[in-house]
Amino acid sequence: MSAANVELQKVERAATFLRDRLGPALATAKLGLVLGSGLKDFATNVQAATTIPFAEIPEWPVPHVEGHGGALVVGTVGGTGVACLTGRVHLYEGWEPADVVRAVRTLRRCGVPSFLLTNAAGGIADDMAPGDLMVLRDHLNLTGRSPLVGPHEAAFGPRFPDQTRVYSPRLLMLLQRTGTRVRPGVYAGLLGPSYETPAEIRMLHRLGADAVGMSTVHEAMALNAMGAEVAGLSLVTNLAAGISPVPLAHAEVVAAGNQAKPVLAALVTSFCRSLSA
Ligand code: HPA
């Protein structure tokens, strides 16, 4: 059996388990929501929620970074069916790209049509301040890795997926119409786990990046290849290295996530409502 078949089997095992456990609640979910660093508490806004820890779902990797949860929460937000991941795994923990995207691929296989990928990010653009929200209009995948490498598996999309519009213009527009101020920008996804050097941030600025983080790009690539509608949202938790006058710390990222909770909850709830309108 090829590596591609093995990965599809893992995704199918997880999908079968979730279809059995969740039935119509998952089959009718309109949005897959991935909650990034410090943002997992949004899941408390999910109504009529069924919560399944990642550890109970076959083949799903379990995150272990501070500020990251580890459960699938399925229910409704603003009347829209959602399947919410209260955390994710990262390459910098030693996981492979296929592990990083397995949960979102599973939800996509279960029929979830649209996704909102959230993350905490460092602000690079000149007008960016901590607390700002950025909707992704594009990304730079600077991890040197891709979830699409390996023997081709048609169930995961074409061999050479188009990436002209990884982030859906329709979803971007809906995010801009929620009443919460968001600015469109380009997200640079890096491997981590170290934060960047000031020279790297100057380079990213010249390359057209508005914010920088260590997640999201592989999930977006895998979902785009599978024909999903993808949106991305960055919470700027800090100014990037060298722009910030002080050294960066993960505690700062988590604290900024906590502070932004009400704004984020209002934005995502309004976005969910607009999806069923
Ligand atoms: N760099 C990379 N990842 C991040 C940052 C940053 O400054 N802030 C939050 N995640």
Image (cartoon, helix red, strand yellow):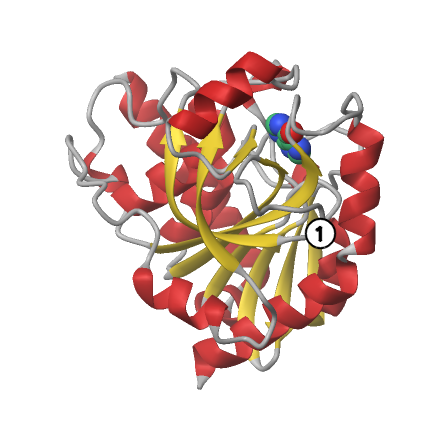
- Can residue 46 be seen here? The reply is no
Quarter holding residue 194: top right
94 or 201, which is in the foreground? 201
Q: Could you say where residue 241 lies in the image, as x and y percent from the top left?
A: 66, 23
Secondary element under disc 1, as helix, strand or loop, is loop
Q: Residue at x 17, y 40 (%)?
A: 162
Q: Nearer the viewer, residue 163 or 79?
A: 163
Compared with 91, 102 (above or below) is below
Residue picked out by circle 1: 131
- Percent of width and height locating residue 192: 59, 18
- 233 lies left or right of 50: left
Query: In the rendered image, which quarter contains the N terminus?
Result: top left
38 to the left or right of 183? right
Is residue 1 left or right of 254 when viewed as pictured? Answer: left
Q: Ligand 1 lies in which image quarter?
A: top right
The residue positioned 84% from the left and 32% from the top of the image is: 251
Q: x, y percentage for residue 46?
A: 69, 68
Measured along the vertical axis of the image, is residue 271 above or below residue 217?
A: below
Q: Quadrant of the C terminus?
A: bottom left
Q: Is residue 91 above or below residue 170?
A: above
